[in-house]
Amino acid sequence: MIHAAFSHLPGKYRGGEGDDPTGFLTANRDGTQRLFDAAARQGVKRVIFLSSRAVFDGLPPGTDLPEDRAPDPQSLYGQAKLAAETHLATLPLTGLSLRATGLYGPGRAHKWQDLFADYRAGKTIAPRRATEVHTADLAQAVRLLLTETTPGPVHLSDILLDRHDLLAEVQRLTACPYPLPAKASTAVSQLRCARLASLGWTPGGTALLHRTLASLLP
């Protein structure tokens, strides 16, 4: 079973509870635990759970994040994901918690839609950088984990991307005349993906990012 469902406000994961934290936890933490329990009762042998880098969001920026790092979630989102991971680890099956960083990929509505529109409209863009991974690389990781026999956390991340560099590519593709934001100076905590690397996982890096961007721009 692959569990990737999550109930949240549109466009928000951290802060996705809005003004209803109780309902958020009931749907996501408690609902996920009930789903895992039902899977175990029905004899499911393997569960791949789409968790998140947010299980570390209470740690200082710039913290190195290997798979054996103890989680420390601050957001309700991270806490819900960790609670689900912890419950999964107690069940008599192979439970794999795939801790993903920010995901991007093609689609009619994509994560950078508003950012690109603001930049192309000449609005001021705040500096920021973050780690990203393509949805195709997520799919590749899930396929590899279908035969993995060791339970536990698995990290999923690819590139450290600065908005300056992202929008420079948008500028090149669209001939947008507006200035780019400054490069960000903030530290970023990065996931180390040793388990996937040992299975032969090869993410697409900046080459895949550049190929994808053309399809995201109207």
Image (tube, rainbow, N blue to C red):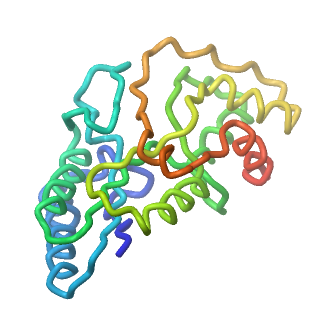
Q: Residue at x 34, y 33 (%)?
A: 66
Q: Residue furthest bottom?
A: 42
Snapshot quadrant of residue 41:
bottom left
Residue shown at the point (72%, 35%) measured from the top left? 121
Q: Provide residue 78's location: percent of width, then percent of height.
A: 25, 45
Which percent across, then down, holds residue 186? 45, 15
Above or below, 25 against 179 in this view is below
Give the total of numbered labels.
0
Question: Is residue 152 or residue 62 the one in the foreground?
Answer: 152
Q: Is residue 39 left or right of residue 8?
A: left
Q: Is residue 1 left or right of residue 156?
A: left
Residue depicted at 42% across the width and 34% down the height: 192
Q: Nearer the viewer, residue 47 or 76?
A: 47
Return the x and y of residue 90 as percentages of the image width and height. 11, 62
From the viewer's side, name the closer residue of 77 and 175: 77
Of residues 130 and 170, the one drawn nearer to the viewer in this rendering: 130
- Quarter residue 22 falls in: bottom left
Q: Position of residue 21 (x, y in %)?
A: 16, 54
Can you say whether 218 is above or below 67 in the image?
A: below
Where does the N terminus fall, quadrant-wise? Answer: bottom left
37 lies above or below 119: below
Figure quadrant of residue 124: top right
In the image: residue 92, left or right of residue 99: left
State left or right for residue 180 relative to residue 20.
Answer: right
Please name the residue shown 58% across and 53% down the image: 137
